[in-house]
Image (cartoon, rainbow, N blue to C red):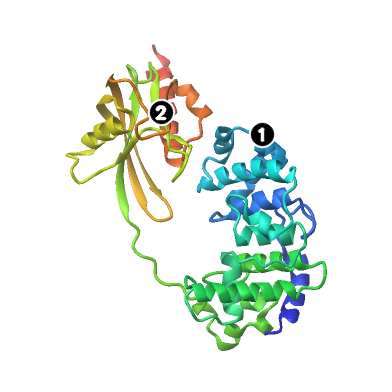
Amino acid sequence: MDYVAVARALIPWHDAQQRDLPWRDAPAGTRDPYRVWVSEIMAQQTRVETVIAYYLRWIERFPTVADLAAADLQEVLKLWAGLGYYARARNLHAAAQQVMREHGGRIPDDAASLRRLPGIGDYTAGAILSLAYNRPAPILDGNVKRVLSRLADVATPLDQDATLRRLWGLARAVVEAAPAGYAGTVNEALMELGATVCTPTDPRCLLCPLAAHCRTAALGVQRERPVVRPKPRTPHYDVTAGVIWEAEPFASRLLIAQRPAEGMLGGLWEFPGGKLEAHDADLAACLRREIAEELGVTIAVGPRVTTVRHAYTHFRITLHVFHARYLDGEPQPLGCADWRWVDLAQLHDFPFPVTDQKVIRVLHETASAARAPRATARGVP
């Protein structure tokens, strides 16, 4: 492959075709490394269209790495709520504090120092180095993997270590072949090409600036690359959650719990509960058991609030949510990090995952409907 020709073909295409995105506020290679870092972390496993609004809110609240480092983690998680993969937010916060502590507030411009920051791996380090500092560092996200797999006709599965090593080598060869001062542009063009032209199911080869260099296009097998093994069947779990009222529903406080800092949805708050087990007699029994194990209290399970279906990366859940009444016991953080009695209006002050946000909306809708005056026939009281 003529890497120099590939790199040179990407530059004018990039200048003519790149999308107008808020983090592209300067030419590639000259951007604020903090904004590059935030945008790249947000875009991991997330559609760009979804990221834009979160990015704008984030930069408005935390315009610098110093602002992020000084923030309370709960505020950070609250601003991230709904974007998913919450370890990204925790790592951003921890890394910002490390940058302030060890680097005087300046984001490092060398790969070794960047990779020592929480949440920064080879890809994010390469993005920061090339897009902010114009260093010829390779990047390899899902889009770039697809472009390079087709360009070089890589016929081995993407999840093989040997395949990834080969793709990293190709990515490095292309960016190092870029003309001086264009490393960031070439890397961004590879990502943009995969996002807009060299797409997963319907590559637009007639519009591709690399069509003349693409081996799979010449062989007519571009739709067969990259090679991806079939995914295993996604497991499903039934999960219960309790809206636990201190006394009467909507007329008293309710009990919420904070998830442990480490692990899935770490640090977020939720309506407590857990997964239905084979030995549970029914959903109500499951919820009583989970609340006893998690908080050390006993409850009476009442009517259903709502049912929420949600898909995570590796599994799906059906969340069965019930009103419940607190009966006995002093709440303790047995299976959670913390707990609080709060009013319904206070729920908006806490970071909740998407599933629980849907429950909160139902609770507010129910409360509003109960407060609304009842309509009468023809306006007669």
Closer to the eye: label 1 or 2: 1
Q: Nearer the viewer, residue 201 or 301?
A: 301
**Residue occupying image coordinates x 61% and y 52%:** 41
- Quarter where residue 378 is shown: top left
Q: What residue is drawn where x is 63% and y is 82%?
A: 214
Q: Which amino acid type corresponds to the residue marked 1 in the rendered image? A: Ala
Q: Secondary structure at mark 2?
A: strand
Residue 338 percent location from the top left of the image: 43, 29
> Disc 1 versus disc 2: distance between alpha carbons?
26 Å
Residue 33 vertical placement versus 68 (above, below) = below
Residue holding disc 2: 256
| Image location of residue 114, percent across then percent down | 66, 55
- Graded by Cα atoms within 10 Å as few (under 14), some (14 to 19) or many (20 or more), the crowding at tag 1 reads few
Q: Which label's residue is closer to the chain start, 1 or 2?
A: 1
Q: Which residue is mark 1?
A: 70
Query: Is 311 or 328 nearer to us in this picture?
Result: 328
* Residue 16 appears in view: no
Position in image of residue 200 (x %, y %): 53, 69
Q: Which residue lies at the image location 63% right of the left edge and 54% below the top edge? A: 40
Q: Position of residue 201 (x, y in %)?
A: 51, 71
175 lies left or right of 142: right
